[in-house]
Amino acid sequence: MGIQGLAKLLGDNAPSSLKDNEIKNYFGRKIAIDASMSIYQFLIAVRQDGSNLTNESGETTSHLMGIFYRTIRMIENGIKPVYVFDGKPPEMKSGELEKRKERREEAQKALEKAEEVGDVENVEKFNRRLVKVTKEHNEECKQLLALMGIPYVDAPGEAEAQCAALVKSGKVFATGTEDMDALTFGSSVLLRHLTFSEARKMPIKEINLNRVLDEMNFSQDEFIDLCILLGCDYCDSIRGIGPKRAVELIKQHKSIETVLDNLDKKKYEIPDNWMFKVSYSFCTCLQNVMFCIFYYEYIHAFT
């Protein structure tokens, strides 16, 4: 679940909530890593000749190499990673999944055209858009993590929600993902760029949820409503309401329900079957999320 424009919005409205940091400064910390997001990053990363890493049989190994070396880097810096894998996506996400399917079909057609004319740049671009993390990718990474002695969690649903639940329960310090929705789910600390290649020389971007709420003068419920207004995987945004206007509306009316009651329906068209109430309920019921650790010999990572 991505939140449209949230990173820039926080930079503009809550700058004290963001800071750049070095990986060495998280020594001794347990961090829940969004496995699917990390695997996707490794799969779209290509070598200088434009090809993926493969074994002797030609099978892609980019995801395994990525997991292995990024995990080693974290361990060398004293971090105790816990990888969290996506479970079954919620029914309310079916619309977004259908859109992604359509975009992949469009990318496939564009790729075929690019290959016909020998457009190398677009071949690479559209190949990346066709990348999808499969069940096989996940299972191979779980086997590798088990062999490395690294704990992992199979989430009942969204990995980011499970990461946030682990943070809220005090089992880990932060969520490591590029998806800003971990904040919406209540992760008090979000770390971006944690699993990026060291060669990219990008600092870790730490975002503190409590500072976000304090600086914007929002409650967590109001922040969730703001994220829904911005647009997420579960419901579209309202056309004409951008980030700045969304902040103004939540500050003025305190909830989406009151925003809708006072919104000029002639000026703003609310999407049909807008599922904002379902989205809100999904984001606020994390206390019921259960987790299961599959590598029992490493259970001390949570104690």
Image (tube, rainbow, N blue to C red):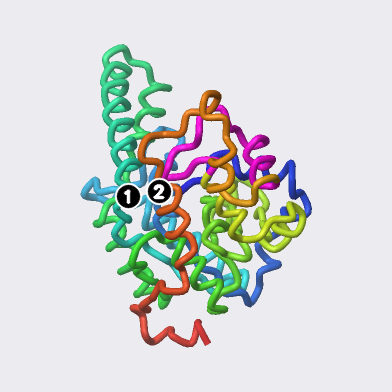
Q: Residue at x 51, y 46 (%)?
A: 228
Check the image and report above or below for 10 versus 82.
Answer: above
Residue type, label 2: Tyr
Query: Is residue 4 in view?
Result: yes
**Residue 78's spot in the image, x, y percent?**
61, 74
Q: Quadrant of residue 176?
A: bottom right
Q: Which one is nearer the viewer's eye here, 53 or 142? A: 142
Q: Does residue 13 appear left or right of residue 300 in this picture?
A: right
Q: Amino acid at mark 1?
A: Val
Residue 286, position as x, y percentages in the image: 46, 68
The reply to whether the magenta stretch includes residue 245 is: yes
The residue indicated by pointer 1 is 133
Q: Give 50 or 150, whichever is nearer the viewer.
A: 150
Whether residue 19 appears in this view of the structure is no
Q: Residue at x 37, y 50 (%)?
A: 62
Dot 2, crowdedness within 10 Å: few (<14), some or many (≥20)? some
Q: In the structure shown, which secondary structural element does the residue marked by tag 1 occupy?
A: loop
Query: Is residue 284 in the magenta section?
Result: no
Please name the residue shown 41% across and 28% down the image: 125
State the residue at coordinates (33%, 78%). 294
Earlier residue among tags 2 and 1: 2
- Expressed as whole percent of the image width and height from the top left, the position of residue 192 reads 59, 53
* Residue range (magenta): 229-251
Residue 201 or 57: which is nearer the viewer?
201
Q: Are marks 2 and 1 in contact (CB under 8 Å)?
A: yes
Which residue has dot 2 on it?
A: 40
Indicate whether 190 appears above or below 78.
above
Between 104 and 185, which is closer to the camera in this rendering?
Answer: 185
In the image, residue 295 above or below residue 286: below
